[in-house]
Image: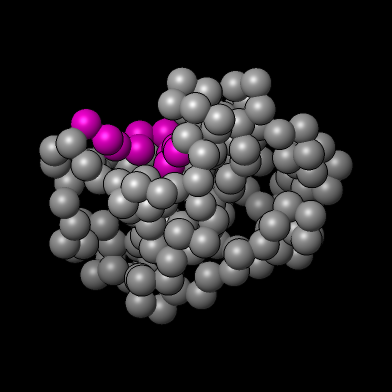
Amino acid sequence: MAGLVADGAGRVPQTEVRVVSLSEASREDLVWCDGIALGSPTNMGSIAWEMKRWWDETAEPLWPKIDGKLGCAFSSSGGLAGGGELTCMTLLTVLMNFGFLVFGVTDYVATGQTLHYGAVCAGLPRAEPDKEACRRLGRRLAEWVQVLVCNRPALGPSHAELRKTP
């Protein structure tokens, strides 16, 4: 999923993208970014304990220094009713506690499939709508960074030519 989110973000001009796994992530990565797409596997309807620990221990000293960055979430669960949206909501709550501005995406990527709280999949994203949900999330993050951080409104979501209704 992270690779597809990165692919979507990379489609927005003048956007630099890094994909960093949790085991490799550092405080410097968080300081460097203007926006973050935060992903976690769903574990019993919530984020993985390793993710919670990283924010509690590694990111905690940055708490006042990263206020105002942009963030969104994605998650994969074992099944369709596995709690992926709950996991995304938890990730968004973590980001909000650090002062991130978070957003949802109202676009539909297929009939009846939108990503209000983030991109969610059951297992790997195999079907095209699941893949497009990931790409759309990344693209929207990059668009909002371009508008709100880089002051480039022409690269914002209102100028994107993407399917937005079912």
Q: Which residues are magenta?
A: 112-121
Residue 62 vertical position relative to residue 139 in the rendered view, above or below: above
Quadrant of the rendered structure where residue 115 is?
Answer: top left
Q: Is residue 111 magenta?
A: no
- The prevailing secondary structure element of the residues shown in magenta is strand
Q: Position of residue 20 (x, y in %)?
A: 67, 62
Q: Residue at x 14, y 41 (%)?
A: 165
Image coordinates for residue 65, horizontal then vertical, percent? 71, 53
Numbered label tally = 0
> Which part of the image, by quadrant, shows the C terminus?
top left
Q: Tell me how the rendering is colored.
A: one colour
- The picture quadrant where one finds residue 155 is bottom left
Name which residue lies at 30% across and 46% down: 129
Image point (60%, 21%), residue name = 45
Q: Residue furthest toward the bottom? A: 14
* Residue 75 position (above or below residue 128): above
108 left or right, relative to 103: left
Is residue 35 toward the left or the right of residue 31 in the image? left
For the question of whether residue 157 can be seen, the reply is yes
The residue sitting at the front extreme is 126
Residue 23 location (% of width, % of height): 79, 55
Residue positioned most to the right: 57
Name the residue nearer the viewer: 145 or 5: 5
Q: Nearer the viewer, residue 138 or 57?
A: 138
Q: Is residue 103 visible?
A: no
Residue beneath the point at 73% across and 52% down? 22
Foreground residue among 100 and 76 = 76
Please say if 75 is above or below 46.
below
